[in-house]
Image (tube, rainbow, N blue to C red):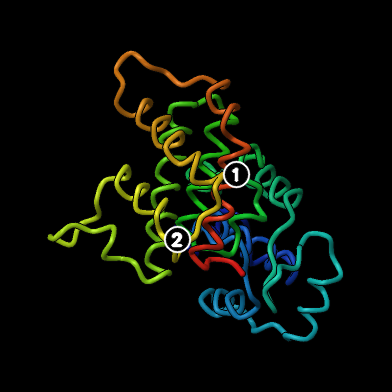
Amino acid sequence: MSLKQFSENTDLLKQTELNRVKLLAFYLLTKKQETAFSLESIILLFEELHLPKPNVSRLTKNIKSTSAFIKTNLKGQFKLHANEIKKIEAAHPSSVAKSESIIADETILPNSLFTETRGYIELLARQINASYEHNIFDGCAVIMRRLLEILLILAHEHCGEPDKIKNTDGHYISLESIIQETKTSKAIALSRDSKSTLDTFRELGNFSAHKIHYNARRSDIDQVKAKFRATIEELIYKANLKK
């Protein structure tokens, strides 16, 4: 959905300035997968819609004075409160019918762990939570494996070891081989507990992806989700995605 279509569907031009900001923040979240926004990004949308440019000082004060927004750890960045998101969804159902946003509880990975890392990591983490919440356990296991593999690659790259996880053609080696390299890597120096669980997550994802007569169950995920969360958190820091 284009910005113009969204504006028409929500009667954005008839809204107050603050309500326009709420709706545009919702647009960035659901249509652009941008969980947080800056005033600069909102003002650009105002300009795109040919709306009067807001007074930055006044608008900042108004945003901070309402519980509809939450201030993030990044200077000048805000995001919509979950309750406000639900209100907008209820008021404008046609604007979310084709949304690609993933709304889920923090069932496996807490939002604070993966927000403000990288967009594709945030999406994978939300998909893990959503698939578990909606009993899609094979999907959950496969995405857990995928997130693990991505973070292992990023950790090796950040620690200056990209060649150790690539073959002579420049392609990444198998996850099983990446795990073996990770276990012996002095640069990454993964904890003993995390090393011991890497193959468990890999095998669980492999079973769900390739084993014909296997279906993951809630109990399979429950047995590993605490250790998975701890391992993912460690890898996020090893990959320097958070400090």
Counting other residues with Cα less than 10 Å from the Cα at mark 2, is it few (<14), some (14-19), or many (20 or more)?
few
Q: Residue at x 59, y 53 (%)?
A: 233
User: Which is closer to the viewer, label 1 or label 2?
Assistant: 1
**In the rendered image of this protein, does residue 57 appear above or below residue 67?**
below
**Image height of 129 relative to 123, above or below:** above
- Residue 7 visible in rendering: no
Q: Residue 151 at x, y = what percent? A: 44, 55
Number of the label disc, if any, that sits on residue 98 = none
- Nearer-N-terminus badge (1/2): 2
Kindly state the secondary structure of the residue where label 2 is placed: loop
Residue 159: x %, y % from top left? 42, 69
Residue furthest top as drawn: 213
Quadrant occupied by the N terminus: bottom left
The reply, left or right, for residue 84 in relation to residue 53 is right
**Residue receiving disc 2:** 2
Type of the residue with mark 1: Arg
**Does residue 157 sit above or below 201 in this rendering?**
below
Residue 112 seen by the camera? yes
**What residue type is disc 2 on?**
Ser
The quadrant in which the C terminus is found is bottom right
Spatial CA span between label 1 and label 2: 36 Å
Measured as percent of width and height from the top left, residue 139 is found at 43, 31
Q: Nearer the viewer, residue 224 or 161?
A: 161
Residue, x 32% and y 42% (percent of image)? 176
Q: Residue furthest right?
A: 65
Residue at label 1? 229
Q: How many marks?
A: 2
